[in-house]
Image: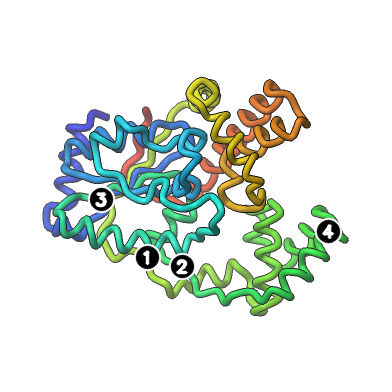
Amino acid sequence: MAINKLKKIIKKYFENQDVNESLIIVAGPTGIGKSYFAIKLALEINGVIINADSIQVYKNIEIISSQPNKNDLTKVDHFLYGFKSINEHYSVGDWLHSLNHVLEYIKSKKKIPILVGGTGMYIDAAINGLSDIPTIEEDIKLKTNIMFDTLGIKKFREIVGEIDPVYYSQNKDKQRLIRAYNVFISTGKSLTDWHKSKSNQGINRKTFSILLNKERKENYKNCDNRFETFIKTGGLDEVRRFWEKKIDRSLSSAKALGIKWFLEFYDGKISLKNAMECSKRDTRRYVKRQNTWFKNNFVPNIKIYL
């Protein structure tokens, strides 16, 4: 769809709405071209871009996390990119708080905010808000970690599947399984039930959401090409500095696609070729999970196939 046609659709959608109380969402899987599309749109509608990607909030990993480059930043104002230390924990609740502050600032500038990203929990939080799940006590976390190490992931998955089958069916990695168990043990209430009773409201704006997609093989090819570009443009240096600083690998910043395997390359455990292959494989798997999430949890105003 041509940007001019989309501009008319958006204008009609918001025709009786104060521009200062609106929000456009551009969502889609990794490697689809969200940033490029959003910049073109922002230039047409006097917009600014706000990050909704959980990894792109971190500085010093700009290349491997595919943050906007200097040329992009000169075209359109960007917010919530590369501003947190890679040593920090930054939750979806922290991001939602930051988002509301940015929206207030943009409101004073008479600009249209365009939220751009592929992190489902960020987009869902902006639209639907967050539940007020109590803080988990450290001794419970410790006991659960010991339990996990003792039982192994297979048995632990079975336990979480009995506690919260809905959440388990969509989240099977270690951190999310432990989170689900800790919440249930601490509160007697499953994460699924907590998510149904969201009291921390999202942004109070009328939204127009756009879901971008393309043929899956082409999307995978784009993701593979990103890693080739990453090597050529200094991405390995980013990971090497990360490795030299001995950053805690359980931190969110260490979960950027590719970092895990390139760190293992610097550990001397695998070859650069294997690091590339594993990174590309993991990215394709991630794209598949993103597409599943959008299919089940996101109802856009319009879908655009690039």
Whether residue 306 sits left or right of residue 295 in the image: it is: left
Residue 160 at least partly seen: yes
Q: CA distance from mark 3 to mark 2?
A: 21 Å
Q: Secondary structure at mark 1?
A: loop
Please provide percent x and percent y for residue 209.
32, 48
Q: Are marks 2 and 4 in contact (CB under 8 Å)?
A: no
Please provide percent x and percent y for residue 83.
41, 50
Q: Are marks 2 and 1 in contact (CB under 8 Å)?
A: yes
Please name the residue shown 68% across and 23% down the image.
272
Which amino acid type is shown beneath numbered disc 4?
Asp
Q: Are marks 3 and 2 in contact (CB under 8 Å)?
A: no
Please provide percent x and percent y for residue 248.
65, 51
Image disc number at residue 113 = 3
Residue under circle 2? 130
Q: Are marks 4 and 1 in contact (CB under 8 Å)?
A: no
Q: Are marks 4 and 3 in contact (CB under 8 Å)?
A: no
Image disc number at residue 281 = none
In the rendered image, the quadrant that contains the C terminus is: top left
Q: Residues within 10 Å of mark 3 (few under 14, many from 20)?
A: many
Depth check, mark 4 against mark 1: the one in front is 4
Q: Secondary structure at mark 4?
A: helix
Image disc number at residue 202 = 1
Outermost residue to the front: 244
Q: Locate residue 237: give its quadrant.
A: top right
Depth check, mark 2 against mark 4: the one in front is 4
Q: Earlier in the sequence, mark 4 or mark 3?
A: 3
The residue lying toward the viewer, choosing from 66 and 70, is 70
Residue under circle 4? 149
Q: CA distance from mark 4 to mark 1?
A: 36 Å
